[in-house]
Image (tube, rainbow, N blue to C red):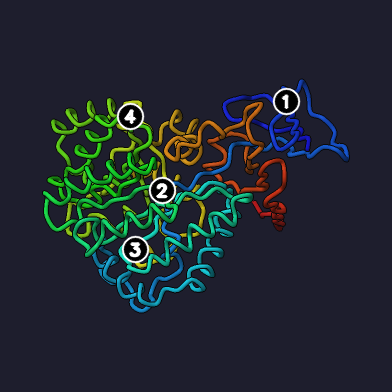
């Protein structure tokens, strides 16, 4: 496959890209617009970039909102209760149907790399096992990492630790946790130590739902970061949500950021979900309830955006469009300067790849797998401002998804 007339991020030039054996073979600047031939694919000056990364989603729960009851309060904890009502209805066929439909939605919107959480607070582990099986079946079409996630507590749920061990043995890629939902502060702290111990034992990555609460006294992030630092697992560890950081005072955050920087851990923020779930106990002023994305980024700490949920007990909207989450996130975090726009796509591409620890095989570089998408627009800013459609998704040099341009006709406006 040969691509011509492509724009690449952070460049004003047009480029030609040659692909052989599923890898980028040549990337060459063009001096002028080239004419298409039968052997080349003309992308007509559109932006070609690395695929979108969905670093935090719950595929096992996708498309279950209102089954059997809706989350009326909009709180995280009622969402967990509603999911508890839905879990007895789970079976492999049910999960497969919903997961495959959701993956198709994500692929249609440029995603080629997914990290999904699977609830291990279920003695059958049917969700986790089904997701691991789907991961293996779709390996040639999309990358999926499965997080063993103890939704109701690693140490508070009966046999939670044993179920986590079973999940590791079955083949989960990532160890998860939820310290703020454990019964006591002591159990929350111990769960973070246990998560790191499991990651070392099984040689797995770590991704913790950490301090997803408005409580400024929820400070398990410092425990996770400290354990990651001492175990030298830093870059393999991710803290998701960390919404309590929104409520931390600045003096504490100043001290905390020193540890976070030294630890090297990653952060994932889920803007649409957090703005919906957090601040539910406030009257006014009402907190936004997102982690300090702007400050983390300015400190040189890796942070990315995710959608988190698609029509489930925690979030009853969602459409697989990470550009929507990016748009929300930049608004909510007040990251609306032109420099923010110029590198906005980092938050749903490169930064997500670092969090998933796949950066060595990710990106538009000679010798790397020829995985890319083509977006309506010529740079990060135009794609973001116009919410540009994903026109093409290519994996290993083979077309995964292609969208035809929409056409709009207007009557002449009277002046």
Identify the residue at image location x=19%, y=43%.
220
x, y percentage for residue 378? 63, 35
Name the element at disc 2: helix
Give the number of the disc on residue 264.
4
Task: Answer few, some or many: residues within 10 Å of disc 1's Cα (few below 14, many 20 plus, some between 14 and 19).
Answer: some
How far apart marks 3 and 1 lie (CA) works out to 45 Å
The quarter in which the N terminus is drawn is top right
Identify the residue at image location x=71%, y=55%.
407
Disc nearer the start of the sequence (2/3): 3
Q: Please give the residue where the numbered disc 2 appears in the rendered image.
A: 328
x, y percentage for residue 282? 17, 56
From this view, report whether residue 209 is shown above or below residue 134: above
Q: Please give the residue where the numbered disc 3 appears in the rendered image.
A: 314
Disc nearer the start of the sequence (3/4): 4
Q: Look at discs 2 and 3 and give the one toward the viewer.
A: 3
Residue in the foreground of this view, choosing between 305 and 61:
61
Give the number of the disc on residue 14.
none
Q: Please give the residue where the numbered disc 1 appears in the rendered image.
A: 26
Residue in the foreground of this view, choosing between 152 and 400:
152
Q: Look at discs 1 and 2 and give the one toward the viewer.
A: 1
Name the element at disc 3: loop
Name the element at disc 1: strand
């Amino acid at each position: 496959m040969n691509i011509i007339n492509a724009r690449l991020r952070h460049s004003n030039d047009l480029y030609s890209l040659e692909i052989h054996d599923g890898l980028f073979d040549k990337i060459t600047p063009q001096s002028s617009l080239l004419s298409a031939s039968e052997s080349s694919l003309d992308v007509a000056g559109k932006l070609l970039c690395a695929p979108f990364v969905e670093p935090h989603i719950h595929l096992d729960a996708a498309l279950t909102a209102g089954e059997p009851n809706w989350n009326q309060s909009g709180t995280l904890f009622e969402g967990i209760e509603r999911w508890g009502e839905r879990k007895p209805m789970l079976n492999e066929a049910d999960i497969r149907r919903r997961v495959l439909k959701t993956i198709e939605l994500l692929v249609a919107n440029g995603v080629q790399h997914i990290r999904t959480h699977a609830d291990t607070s279920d003695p059958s582990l049917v969700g986790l096992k089904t997701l691991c099986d789907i991961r293996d079946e779709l390996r040639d079409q999309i990358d999926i990492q499965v997080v063993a996630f103890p939704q109701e507590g690693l140490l508070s749920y009966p046999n939670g630790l044993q179920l986590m061990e079973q999940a590791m043995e079955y083949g989960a890629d990532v160890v998860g946790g939820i310290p703020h939902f454990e019964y006591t502060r002591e159990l929350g702290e111990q769960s973070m130590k246990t998560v790191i111990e499991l990651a070392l034992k099984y040689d797995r990555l770590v991704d913790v739902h950490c301090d997803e609460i408005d409580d400024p006294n929820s400070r398990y992030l410092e425990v996770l970061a400290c354990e990651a630092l001492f175990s030298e697992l830093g870059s393999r560890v991710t803290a998701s949500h960390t919404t309590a950081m929104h409520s931390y005072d600045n003096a504490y955050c100043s001290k905390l950021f020193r540890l976070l920087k030294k630890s090297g851990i990653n952060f994932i923020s889920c803007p649409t979900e957090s703005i919906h779930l957090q601040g539910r106990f406030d009257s006014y002023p009402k907190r936004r309830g997102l982690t300090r994305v702007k400050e983390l980024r300015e400190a040189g700490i890796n942070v990315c955006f995710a959608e988190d949920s698609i029509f489930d007990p925690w979030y009853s909207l969602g459409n697989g469009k990470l550009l929507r989450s990016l748009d929300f996130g930049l608004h909510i975090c007040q990251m609306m300067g032109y420099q923010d726009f110029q590198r906005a796509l980092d938050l749903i591409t490169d930064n997500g790849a670092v969090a998933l620890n796949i950066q060595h095989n990710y990106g538009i570089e000679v010798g790397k797998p020829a995985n890319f998408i083509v977006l309506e627009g010529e740079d990060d800013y135009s794609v973001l401002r116009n919410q540009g459609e994903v026109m093409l998704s290519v994996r290993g040099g083979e077309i995964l998804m292609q969208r035809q341009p929409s056409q709009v006709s207007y009557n002449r406006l009277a002046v």
